[in-house]
Amino acid sequence: MRNPLSKTIVEIQPSGIRKFFDIVSEMKDAISLGVGEPDFDTPWHIREEGIYSLEKGRTFYTSNAGLKDLKIEICRYLERKHNLKYDYNHEVIVTIGGSEAIDISLRAMLDPGDEVLVPQPSYVSYMPCVTLAGGTPVIIKLKVEDQFKLTKEDLLASITDKTKVLILPFPNNPTGAIMEYDELAQIAKIVVEKDLYVISDEIYSELTYGRKHVSIAELPGMKERTILINGFSKAYAMTGWRLGYAAGPKTIIEQMIKIHQFAIMCAPTTSQYAAVEALKNGDPDVEMMREAYDQRRKFLINAFKEMGLDCFEPFGAFYVFPSIKRLGMTSDEFATKLLQEEKVAVVPGTAFGDCGEGFLRISYAYSIENLKIALERIERFVKKYSKK
Amino acid sequence: MREQILSAIDKNSKLTAKDIAAMLGSTEEEVTAIIKELEEETIICGYPTLINWDKTESEKVTALIEVKVTPQRGEGFDKIAERIYKFDEVESVYLMSGGFDLTVMIEGKSMKEVANFVSSKLAPMEAVLSTATHFVLKKYKEHGLPLVNEKTDERMLITP
């Protein structure tokens, strides 16, 4: 028989998280701090709107690019938050989570040989999506000394004449790093000079603490070079609804709609109706959740400081990224031993790129009670291995 | 800071001053001092525990009583409300707008005990014009917290 598989697919490495997940799921009664989704339920008024749409029999396809009402609300939201004006008719597409938007924006822009800059540590799907789209991923290693921000030096050093797209993953999963206006301005300048495009994954945009999230599309000359990706999963605790969107120049969005049309048809109708309600009336929920995350964030940073683990202060998402370098273990060793000995699951930093070595991703999408128990165990573990 | 402390302990009075300080980026001393202040100003009035008595062996009956009263000259409703809330059986008393004046929540060991209270203590009061007693059959949610079905974390243990 012939080999049924595609070489490209076979060569793509499975996510490091997957491997760890398999170990964890064997463990009964483990406490996990390894989840990348909110612990809150979707606010009831949003769920109720979804239920209502089902009762009403709104069970058909929507237009490929998404419900008109939803696209209008998305444009209003982007104007309200970032003062960005998009035409709902040509410059917005509703997708199946931010994930699909990442995939189809890359596919719409890349030809074989095009290089895409992927700052790491970052979300696990950028690299495989670039490869699947026929492009060549080029990793930019972010450094803890820079608070895991992208600097203009690192960017310049990675650009070649084949570079076409920069992926900008801020607020960042797994580090919690954010980029502020002045920092983005330096990046934007280079992007314009070198004639690049940016895919800005802003799925955690609502979760920044004490500092407002800035989209790179807000900077002069950047709107026409940026695909802004966002969604409902993190801000409104709607991961299972699978709903996101992309906004950008008409020429690119048009091609994205084409891929979406053939591969997906349209995003789930029920989720789209619920999302309209989220954008119209969800601000207070976001505020409440942000406040809760912020308390847990401070709580964790404080706890790590007391434990003597270095941890830079993250201002976004719901992760802290402490360093375990002083214990002389690799991230993988630490995470595996912690799981076996104290039954606490955390994700090794290496799951998000090789430069995550020496770090752990710890999620605070858990109640304070939960965090307290887990932290006691981590502290005991750290003490035990500090002596050696 | 006062508001933040209050909303932190509103749903969980077990948080220690140390925890609250860590959550709000403050110090244990400052939090302790503010809580003391709030207690003295009776903004924090107590730290009761939310118990679902239905799950225990002990018998408890809760009733909501709508009470119509005649307000008293110079005192309004406060005086009569006070005469009512001083009874130990009374859990809470609210002044209402609409078809009646006071909502009185009573907790007793049995329906008989509650009925007794209404007929011998509450109804005969001079200012009380009428009462309507409703017994609570089941409690679903109190103080913003659901009392039924414990929710489990249904998320996968590790996700990217």
Image (cartoon, rainbow, N blue to C red):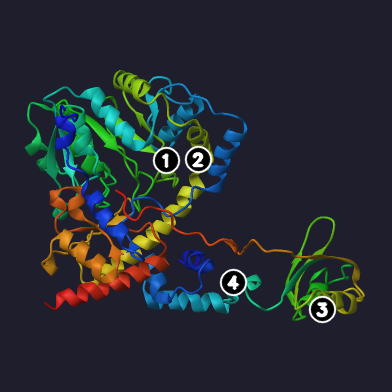
Disc on res. A366: none
Comparing marks 4 and 3, which lies closer to the viewer?
A: 3
Please give the residue where the numbered disc 1 appears in the rendered image: A232
Spatial CA span between label 4 and label 2? 31 Å
Task: Give left or right: position of A221 versus A96.
Answer: left
Q: How many marks?
A: 4
- Please report the residue visible at 44 percent of the width from the left and 40 percent of the height from the top: A241
Please give the residue where the numbered disc 2 appears in the rendered image: A278
Q: Give SS at disc 3.
A: helix
Which chain is indicated by disc 4?
B
Comparing marks 3 and 1, which lies closer to the viewer?
A: 3
Q: Are marks 4 and 1 on the same chain?
A: no
Please give the residue where the numbered disc 4 appears in the rendered image: B50
Residue A375, position in %: x, y?
Answer: 31, 69
Q: Give SS at disc 2.
A: helix
Residue B62 in sight here: yes
Label whose residue precedes the other's in the sequence (2 or 1): 1
Residue A204, position in %: x, y?
Answer: 34, 45
Which chain is indicated by disc 3?
B
Task: Give left or right: position of B79 versus A73.
Answer: right
- Please report the residue visible at 35 percent of the width from the left and 53 percent of the height from the top: A209
